[in-house]
Image (tube, rainbow, N blue to C red):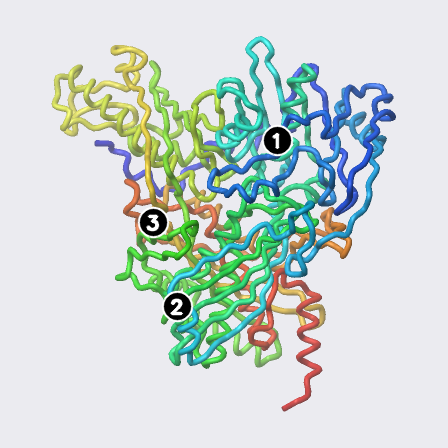
Amino acid sequence: MSANDGLLGKPLARLEDPPLVTGRGRFAGDIDFPGQFHMRMVRSPHAHAGIGEIDGAAALALEGVHAVWSVADIADVPPIDFRSDRQVEALKPFRQHVLALGRARYVGEPVAAVFAETPYVAEDAAELVEVHYDPLPATVAADGEPGEFAPGLGTEATLLTHTCGDAKAGFAKAYAVVELDLRTGRHSGVPMETRGAIGVYDAARDRLELHGAAKVPHRNKETLIRMLGLAPERIHLHEGHVGGGFGIRGELYPEDLLVLLAARRLGRPVKWIEDRQEHLTAANQGREQRHRARLAVDEEGRILALETEIWHDQGAYLRTHGVSVPNRSMCSLPGLYRVPAFRASCHVRLTNKTPAATYRAPGRFESSFVRERLMDAAAHRLGIDPVEIRRRNLIAADDLPYTVAYDEPYAETLPLDSGDYPLLLRKALEAVGWDDLRADLARRRTAGELVGAGVATFLEESGRGPSDGARIAVDRDGVVEIVTGGASVGQGFATAMAQICAATLGVDYRGIAVVHGQTDRIPYGIGAHAARATVMTGSAVHATALAVRGKALAAASELLQTPAGSLTTRDGIVQADTGGPSISLGEIVRTRGPDALAAEEFYETSQCTFPYGAHIAVCRVDPGTGAVTVERFMVAYDVGRAVNGATLEGQLVGGCVQGIGGALFEEFVYDEAGQPLAVTFADYLLPTVAEIPAIECLVTEDAPSPRNPLGIKGGGEGGINGVGAAIASAVDEAIGIPGAIDRTPITPERVLALLRSRDSRPSP
């Protein structure tokens, strides 16, 4: 056995921090190679236009410019492929080419690439490239009339459905039906570090390298292998430090392909670093959906049926996730509630905006906003307390495991594993002092303040398989190395893996070296996305550490002439429980050889784990400006079993801050011609520390997952999921207009318009 089991859950200091806080991190911008070219993109200024002649002569005449490419120079390169082979063939025509082919479909689309000796010359040269455009009508409303994507193809890429039960019968027998028209605004992760990529070609070994990879290096390598027709050993991706992921980083973008193609064809390394305006114009956006939703309830407020029609604004192309986000939006809509009948349809529409993809809690932030708005509307219609109507509909602990299954073969079944949803809601309300809080808010409203509180519950999904593995080896000095295909995007990945290994193997976590994101060190890996890393890679590390510990106990048993069953490991030492002779792990390796304490094991699963949460918001509205201030916010979340309490809380707080941004401030806005109107931080508003309260976190471990040996569930997305819904409910109460908030972000202009409308109504 190991004597370090108590390590799990402790708020141990992060291993990743020393180079980051001392300015020694190596982000994409810090990586340079001798003789490198710098790449600059020529981007479309039109949302929709035919592309005629591209003339690079003036750019090529500039000293230091080596090449100018258009799509004709890379005609043999296919469109950027989907990550998953689950995407249907009919969606492939909507993929994006590396450089625009025939048409530009959004402002910022790469049309040409310039390669020069310095980034400054490259930027000057890009402005000299002449592109002849033939402007075309732009489609900017996903819920309007579909336009033309290409000859013979409309802008509705597909119509998806999710159904279960008899929704028609549920609505027919309803005591009350509430109907809402809801919208979530377009926003994105906007990490501190913009995108960057450095391509290197090693001619001696005929090998390509991509530096600056993030999030899913192995998945992107697989896509590159298919697209470029390479053998696996001919390309490797290398992850450095990453200034935040949040879905937006780590996808396969046109620029990633271009630096690799140019490095091989031009014979020199090629570096590209995005500026902030490019990032706000061309990197993945998301969230923009319209829902026409209906909820049928009985006289006691219990759900009979839920129905929604969705218009998902995908932007100009289907990127690597295909239709994952709209599928997630539909399957996540029931949340933690018993929904006996459900019907959802989703129009996946292409518009002349920047393409959309995943953003932290993809589809779930959107669906939680819709579901919880419906619950508030039903509570108001029936005169039931909003918390009470939620209690009546939560899936009971005795009902778990509980399966949410849909009729369509492509729709994902949700086999919920463990939980006590009513218990978590009760704990959250008690922790925030709900009854006293409500009384205090009522007093403040009587005194003239516009204040209110809102609650939202939600379901999360984590640990999606099917498998991941790890390699662990101990060297002659007792140093433990973990090699994984996981990735670090700032979430404390190395610390979590070291902590799991240390607890299992019986060593000091500070003496463990964690290698990740390097495809030349390990041929597989899930990376870090969709709250997978701790569950999948952590379980693989646990299994591998068990195997190494087993080898250590067996070797020590022989060397110490002591039964293995009486031995334990602590601080890198193997000895009997009762004392006596001992031997270090390093001594075992020195005695038995370099592979004596090395192992590679896998963790496989066909099912996910399902953490869950409740959010509580307290908001104040300024009657003069309409500005919303979040006075308090609580995130309550059951994670099954925590690995590191401090990093988990950091994840929850960070996610909550992003959720507040999406709920109140952040929105990519376009005009009728498809021109983006928020391409600097003067217009795309991020929350600062002045707008964020001290986020309160309640982490519970009441429902360990039975689906992995550690009982853990993912924590990366629980902080953001219900934020928009909880704040909307709080603002409704503050301004005294039930159901007033029907879209995010809840900007001062929109709130002020609601207040003016309220005040202009004649008295009853």
Disc 1 or disc 3, which is closer to the eye? 1
What separation in Å lies between label 2 and label 3 (alpha carbons)? 34 Å
Q: In the image, is 242 to the left or to the right of 46?
A: left
| Outermost residue to the bottom | 764
| Outermost residue to the front | 152
- Identified at 38% across, 79% down, the residue is 300
Disc 2 or disc 3, which is closer to the eye? 2
The vertical placement of 673 against 89, above or below, is below
Numbered mark located on residue 640 in the image: 3
Give percent across and percent down for residue 142.
Answer: 64, 57
What separation in Å lies between label 1 and label 2 (alpha carbons)? 44 Å
- Sequence-wise, the earlier of marks 1 and 3 is 1
Considering the numbered disc 1 on the image, is that residue within a helix, a strand or a loop? loop
Give percent across and percent down for residue 126.
Answer: 80, 31
Identify the residue under disc 1. Answer: 78
As shown in the figure, which amino acid type bears the numbered disc 3?
A: Gly
Considering the numbered disc 2 on the image, is that residue within a helix, a strand or a loop? loop
As shown in the figure, which amino acid type bears the numbered disc 2?
A: Asp
Give percent across and percent down for residue 533.
Answer: 42, 38
As shown in the figure, which amino acid type bears the numbered disc 1?
A: Pro
Judge by depth and name the residue closer to the eye, 688 or 581: 688
Identify the residue under disc 2. Answer: 166
Neighbours of disc 3 within 10 Å: few (<14), some (14-19), many (20+): many
- Identified at 17% across, 26% down, the residue is 567
- Sequence-wise, the earlier of marks 2 and 3 is 2
The vertical placement of 69 against 251, above or below, is above
Neighbours of disc 1 within 10 Å: few (<14), some (14-19), many (20+): some
What separation in Å lies between label 1 and label 3 (alpha carbons)? 43 Å
Judge by depth and name the residue closer to the eye, 553 or 373: 373
**Is residue 545 visible to us here?**
yes
- Sequence-wise, the earlier of marks 1 and 2 is 1
